[in-house]
Image (cartoon, rainbow, N blue to C red):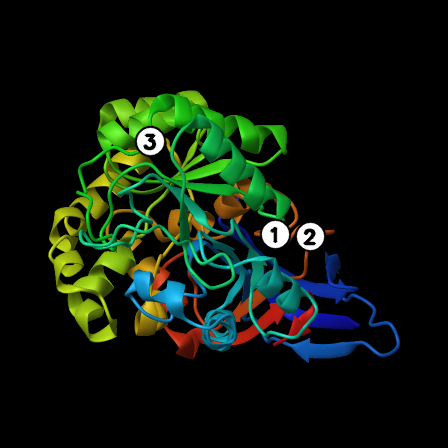
C-alpha cells in the first residue's frame, strides 16, 4: 500500500516549524518527503492544498475496557461483553486522532492482538494487564463488609491484590508473562476505590523496589498511580519511570523527576468529566466526593512540572460514557502551557515514555505512518485538536481510517 500526500504543511514537533512538501507512505511507514515526489504505480494521491499534517496522537493513560465509572463492577462482567464495549471505545479514540494508546490497566494481550490483526478498529494498544494493588489499595474494590479476595482471573477488571515482596514479584512476573509492555502499581489512594484515602501512601518501599526490579529485569518499566507529593516522591525514589496524575506534587517532586529522568502523565480531563458527569455513568457517590480533592490542584501541578523542566506525556484516564471528552484535555492543558508543548506531550513526549522514540510521534522518514491532516494550526491554537471539525483525515500505518 502506498499513499502520497501532496502540497502539505508538515510539522516538525521538535522545532514547531512547518515545511511545504509532499509526503509518501509505503508499507505502513513514512517512505519519503520532499517536493514533486513521484507516485509509484498503484499509489493513492491526495492533494491537501496546504492543509497541515502532524503526527498521530498518543494517549499515554487510557482504560479501553472501562465501559463504566464503577470500576469494581467490571470484575463481574463477561469478557465478551467488556470486549464489545472496548471495541466501540477504541474506535472512538481513533476517530479523534489517537493512533496509539497506552492502557493503564484493564486491557490485555487479546485486545492488543485483535487490534494488530485488524479485528478491532482502534489505536495501536500498549497494555499493562492488571494494576498491582495492596490490600485496601486503589484496585481493591471490596467494600468494608466484604472479606473474600477474588481477582476473577478469568474475567475483566483493572487490578489484582498482592501483598508482600514475594507476592508482588510473582504478580509483576505474571503480568509480564502475559506480554505487558509495562507494570502498573497503585502507589497512593484514588478516587474510584471505596476504602482508601486520596492522601494515603500504598506499598512499602521494599515492595515498590521489588516491582521495579522485576520490570527492569524484563526490560520494561513501572508506571505508578500517585497523587500526593509524599506518594509521588516515594515512587520516584523506588525507580518508577512514570507518575500517573501527580496532582499534588511539590518542588521536591520536580527535583526527583529530573534526577531520575522520569515522566509525569497528568490526566486533567478525567476530574473535570467526573465532576460533571461521574454519577450519571456509574461513579459511586463516595468516590464522587473525592474528586474535589484533586480537581483544582491538577493545573497547578502541571504548571509547576512544566516550569521545572519535567518530562511530560499526554493522558486522559476517562471512564464510561466520558471517553468522548478525550480531546478536551488539549484545551485544559493550554490554560497553563503553550499549544506546541501540549502537542509535544501527545506526540514525541509520549513516544519517549513508551520507548518508541522515532517510531511514532514524528514525521521523520522511517517512522510509522501515523498522521493527522488538519484544517487549522495546533501550534497556534490547541483547541484545533479538540474540535473534530478541524480533523480532515486520520491515517494509521499509511491507511486512511
Q: Are marks 3 and 1 in contact (CB under 8 Å)?
A: no
Separation of disc 3 and disc 1 at Cα?
Answer: 34 Å
| Label 1: few (<14), some (14–19) or many (≥20) C-alpha neighbours in 10 Å | many
| Label 3: few (<14), some (14–19) or many (≥20) C-alpha neighbours in 10 Å | many
Quadrant in which residue 54 is drawn: bottom right
- The first of marks 3 and 1 along the sequence is 3
Quadrant in which residue 68 is drawn: bottom left
Separation of disc 1 and disc 2 at Cα?
Answer: 6 Å
Q: Are marks 1 and 2 in contact (CB under 8 Å)?
A: yes
Q: Which residue is mark 3?
A: 203
Asked if 355 appears above or below 95 in the picture, the reply is: above
Q: Do we see residue 152 in this rendering?
A: yes
Q: Secondary structure at mark 3?
A: loop
Q: Do we see residue 381 in this rendering?
A: no
Identify the residue at horizontal 26%, vertical 43% (top origin): 136
State the image coordinates of residue 351 (x, y, percent, origin top left).
55, 46
Separation of disc 2 and disc 3 at Cα?
Answer: 39 Å
- The first of marks 2 and 3 along the sequence is 3
Q: Is residue 400 left or right of residue 57?
A: right
Identify the residue at horizontal 25%, vertical 35% (top origin): 304
Q: Nearer the viewer, residue 280 or 400?
A: 280
Q: Are marks 2 and 3 in contact (CB under 8 Å)?
A: no
Specify the quadrant that holds the N terminus: bottom right
Q: Which residue is mark 2?
A: 367
State the image coordinates of residue 327 (x, y, percent, origin top left).
37, 65
Q: Which residue is mark 1?
A: 360
State the image coordinates of residue 180 (x, y, percent, origin top left).
58, 47
Q: Secondary structure at mark 1?
A: loop
State the image coordinates of residue 353 (x, y, percent, origin top left).
51, 41
Amino acid at each position: 500500500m502506498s499513499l502520497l500526500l501532496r502540497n502539505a504543511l508538515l510539522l516538525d514537533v521538535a522545532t514547531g516549524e512547518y515545511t511545504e512538501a509532499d509526503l509518501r507512505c509505503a508499507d505502513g511507514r513514512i517512505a519519503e518527503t520532499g517536493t514533486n515526489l513521484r507516485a509509484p504505480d498503484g499509489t493513492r494521491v491526495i492533494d491537501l492544498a496546504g492543509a497541515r499534517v502532524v503526527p498521530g496522537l498518543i494517549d499515554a493513560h487510557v482504560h479501553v475496557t472501562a465501559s463504566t465509572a464503577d470500576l469494581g463492577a467490571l470484575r463481574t462482567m463477561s469478557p465478551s461483553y467488556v470486549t464489545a464495549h472496548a471495541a466501540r471505545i477504541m474506535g472512538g479514540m481513533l476517530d479523534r486522532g489517537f493512533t496509539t494508546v497506552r492502557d493503564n490497566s484493564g486491557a490485555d494481550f487479546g485486545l492488543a492482538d485483535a487490534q494488530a490483526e485488524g479485528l478491532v478498529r482502534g489505536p495501536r494498544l500498549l497494555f499493562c494487564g492488571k494494576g498491582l494493588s495492596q490490600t485496601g489499595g486503589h484496585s481493591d474494590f471490596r467494600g468494608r463488609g466484604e472479606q473474600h479476595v477474588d481477582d476473577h482471573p478469568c474475567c475483566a477488571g483493572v487490578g489484582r491484590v498482592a501483598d508482600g515482596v514475594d507476592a508482588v514479584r510473582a504478580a509483576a512476573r505474571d503480568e509480564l508473562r502475559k506480554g505487558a509492555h509495562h507494570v502498573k502499581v497503585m502507589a497512593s489512594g484514588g478516587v474510584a476505590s471505596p476504602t482508601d484515602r486520596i492522601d494515603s501512601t500504598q506499598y512499602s518501599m521494599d515492595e515498590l523496589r521489588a516491582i521495579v526490579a522485576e520490570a527492569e529485569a524484563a526490560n520494561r518499566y513501572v508506571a505508578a498511580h500517585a497523587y500526593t507529593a509524599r506518594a509521588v516522591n516515594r515512587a520516584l525514589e523506588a525507580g518508577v519511570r512514570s507518575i500517573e496524575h501527580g496532582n499534588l506534587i511539590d518542588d521536591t517532586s520536580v527535583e526527583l523527576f529530573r534526577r531520575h529522568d522520569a515522566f509525569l502523565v497528568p490526566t486533567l480531563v478525567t476530574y473535570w468529566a467526573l465532576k460533571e458527569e461521574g454519577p450519571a455513568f456509574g461513579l459511586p457517590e463516595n468516590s464522587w466526593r473525592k474528586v474535589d480533592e484533586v480537581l483544582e490542584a491538577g493545573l497547578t501541578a502541571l504548571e509547576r512540572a512544566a516550569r521545572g523542566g519535567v518530562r511530560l506525556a499526554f493522558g486522559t484516564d476517562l471512564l464510561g460514557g466520558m471517553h468522548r471528552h478525550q480531546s478536551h484535555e488539549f484545551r485544559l492543558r493550554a490554560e497553563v502551557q503553550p499549544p506546541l508543548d501540549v502537542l509535544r506531550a501527545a506526540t514525541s513526549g509520549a513516544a519517549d515514555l513508551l520507548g518508541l522514540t522515532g517510531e511514532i510521534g514524528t514525521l521523520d522518514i522511517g517512522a510509522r505512518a501515523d498522521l493527522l491532516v488538519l484544517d487549522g494550526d495546533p501550534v497556534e491554537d490547541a483547541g484545533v485538536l479538540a474540535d473534530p471539525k478541524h480533523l480532515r483525515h486520520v491515517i494509521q500505518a499509511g491507511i486512511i481510517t
